[in-house]
Amino acid sequence: MIYKLFFILALLVNGPSDNEDVLEWDENIQLKWSDFKGQPQDFGDIVAITSSGISFKFSIKEGNGQVIEFNTQVQAHFYPKRSWVHKKKSSDHILAHEQLHFDITELHVRKFKSEISQLEISNNIKQHLNQTYKHINRELAIMQHTYDIETNYSRNAIMQSAWKIKVDNALKRYGDYKNIHKK
């Protein structure tokens, strides 16, 4: 039986709502099927839907009418209640495909942080941050779609392996921008 995988990209400007459960991306933690808490839908041969996105917050400090400092918080989140799986059709291979969707989201968090680090403080910083956020989300959506197309929604095992290597290498390249998780 052929399985078609699909993802939903949840892009939240101000992060998740206060009552929404989220999982923050962590290099030491992999998704489990038990993390997919949404109600499975009947979309033909779609086995799982992963909902992940970039949450972004910033604060600006002003003095004498000029922006003198800004701080940002950027995270990759997985949304369990928006993600679902048909458990009887699930497999480790499909879970690895879904994990890579989440990894791609983290990659774009790191790219976003890299771009933020190059922004200069100005009175237009809010607009620059928002433009950069929109730009990185467009790139993220394109890469997620390309990943699904090139791997044929996980069915092409060779391309799936190639994408795993590609994303892992890119995460390493942007390693200076990863969140540090304290245990």
Image (spheres, rainbow, N blue to C red):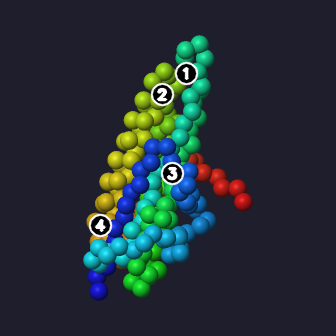
Q: Earlier in the sequence, mark 2 or mark 3?
A: 3
Q: Earlier in the sequence, mark 2 or mark 4?
A: 2
Q: Earlier in the sequence, mark 1 or mark 4?
A: 1
Q: Where is mark 2, residue-wise? A: 125
Q: Distance of mark 3 from mark 4, alpha carbons?
A: 30 Å
Q: Is residue 168 visible?
A: no
* Front of the two marks 2 and 4: 2
Q: Distance of mark 2 from mark 1, alpha carbons?
A: 8 Å
Front-most of residues 137 and 45: 45
Front-most of residues 85 and 31: 85
Q: Quadrant of residue 53?
A: bottom left
Residue 156, percent across and down?
A: 32, 76
* Front of the two marks 1 and 4: 1
Question: Dividing the image into 4 quarters, which one contains the C terminus?
Answer: bottom right
Q: Label 2 is placed on what type of residue?
A: Ile
Q: Is residue 181 left or right of residue 148?
A: right
Secondary structure under badge 1?
strand
Q: Where is mark 1, residue-wise? A: 67
For the residues bearing labels 2 and 3, Cβ distance under 8 angstroms: no
Q: Is residue 115 left or right of residue 18?
A: left
Q: Earlier in the sequence, mark 2 or mark 1?
A: 1
Q: Where is mark 3, residue-wise? A: 16
For the residues bearing labels 1 and 3, Cβ distance under 8 angstroms: no
